[in-house]
Amino acid sequence: MKKKQTFEIMDVTLRDGSYAINFQFSTNDEKHICTSLERLGLKYIEIGHGMGVGASCLKNGLALHTDQEYLECAQTYLKSAKYGMFCIPGTASLEDIDLMAEYGCSFIRVGTNVENIAQSEEYIKRAKKHHMLVMANYMKSYAATPEEFSEAVKHSESWGADLIYIVDSAGNMIPADIEKYYHAIRNCSSTIKTGFHGHNNIGLALSNSLFAAELGIDFIDCSLQGLGRSSGNTSLEHFIICLMRLGYDISTDIISMLLDSKKYIHPFMKKAGINPIDTICGISGFHTSYLKEIQKCSVRHAVNPLLLIDAYSKRDKVNMDTHLLDEIARQLPKDEQSVETVDFMDYFGAEQCR
C-alpha cells in the first residue's frame, strides 16, 4: 500500500533560484517555468527577486523586471497553483504587501533571524488583513537554541502566522537538527504548520528534505535542478523520484519534469563540482550574503578566506561585525596564494547587510 503524501512541496526555482543568475529571470522564463510546474502538479510557487518583494536595487542586485511585472506574469499564466513572494522586513515595506495582494498572491513568507522576530509583527498582521497564508521563515535557524526558537514561535503564532519554517540557510544542518527544531515548535504549539528549507552546501539538502517529509513537516522547499543561492536547494527532480522510491503516492510525470527542467533550467546551471566556499560555509554555518566582506578582508590582510570564514563563524553565525572580522584576520597566517585561488564572482545579494 502506498504512503499518502501529507505535505506540500513549495517550488522556489523562480525566487531562490534567481540568486544563481544575479536575479535575471525574464517574465518569459517565469511564464514557461510556472506553467510547467503547474502541469506537473505543483500547488505552491514562489516568484520574484531572491531577497523578496521590494528588494531590487543596486545594493541588493537589480532584477531584470519589477515586482509588479513578475506578479502580473504569475497572475496571467497560473490558473490553479498558488503563488507568493518572500519578504524581509526593512527591505520590503508594508505597502509591498498591499501590492502582492492586489496581484492575487495567496501566501507570503516573512523572513527574519530568530533574534529579530519582533521586526515581523507588522508584516504578519498586514498580510493577514489580506487573508494571505503567512509563513514565518526563521533564517539561520541553527543559530538559535531550541528554547529561543520556541519563544519566537509563540510570538509569530500570536501575531497570526500560519506556519513556521525551519531554514538551513548555510546548508550545515543534519537530520537530528531538523528534529530538534521541529520538536521546539511542537513543544509550544500543537496546531501551527511547519516547513523546511534546505541548502546543499555539504550535500545533505535531499536527505534532510526526505527526513523532514518522514518527520511530518507540512511544507518542503525544492527547486528545479536544485537551482538556488550558494550551492543550491533540494532538487525537485531528485526529491520526487526518491519519494516515489519510498512508496509515496505521487503521480508526477517524471519524463515531462526532466525534459522541462533540461529545457528551461539547465542553461542557467553553473559547472558541476564541489565549490570550496559553499562547502566551508556549510561546515561553519556561514551565510553567503556576507562573502563580500570576507573577500575584502582576506585581500586586505592577505589571509586564506576559507580559514577566515571558519574562524569568524566560531564567534558569530548570525551577524557581520567588520571590526571583529579584521581582528580575527590579523591573527591568521599570511596566505596570498589562497586569496587568488578562491573565486567570489558567483555570489549575489545582500539581505544581511541592511
Image (cartoon, helix red, strand yellow):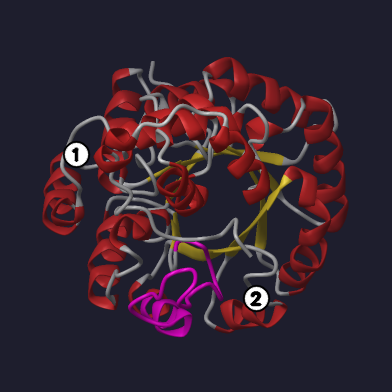
Residue 248 in the image: state x and y as whole percent. Answer: 38, 25
The circle drawn on residue 43 is: none
- Give me the C-alpha separation between circle 2 and circle 1: 35 Å
Looking at the image, residue 116 sits to the left or right of residue 336; the answer is: right
Residue 319 in the image: state x and y as whole percent. Answer: 67, 46
- State the extent of the magenta-drawn residues as a range: 50-73
Looking at the image, residue 328 sits to the left or right of residue 18; the answer is: right
State the quadrant of the C terminus.
Answer: bottom right
Does 291 lie within the magenta span? no
Looking at the image, residue 234 sits to the left or right of residue 190; the answer is: left
In this orientation, does residue 250 appear? Answer: no
Is the C-beta separation of discs 2 and 1 under 8 Å? no
**Which residue lies under the disc numbered 2?**
97
In front: label 2 or label 1 = 2
Q: Please give the name of the residue rendered at 25% of the width and 30% of the height, measured from the top-left corner.
A: 274
Q: Does 249 sit above or below residue 108?
A: above
Residue 88 in the image: state x and y as whole percent. Answer: 63, 63
In this orientation, does residue 177 appear? Answer: yes
Q: Please give the name of the residue rendered at 52% of the width and 50% of the height, measured from the top-left corner.
A: 290
Give 264 or 352, whichever is nearer the viewer: 352
Dominant secondary-structure state across the stretch colored magenta = loop
| Residue type highlighted by circle 1 | Ile
- Asked which secondary structure carries label 1, the reply is helix
Residue 97 in the image: state x and y as whole percent. Answer: 65, 76
**Which residue lies under the disc numbered 1?**
254
Residue 153 image-quadrant placement:
top right
Give 179 or 344, whichever is nearer the viewer: 344
- Asked which secondary structure carries label 2, the reply is helix
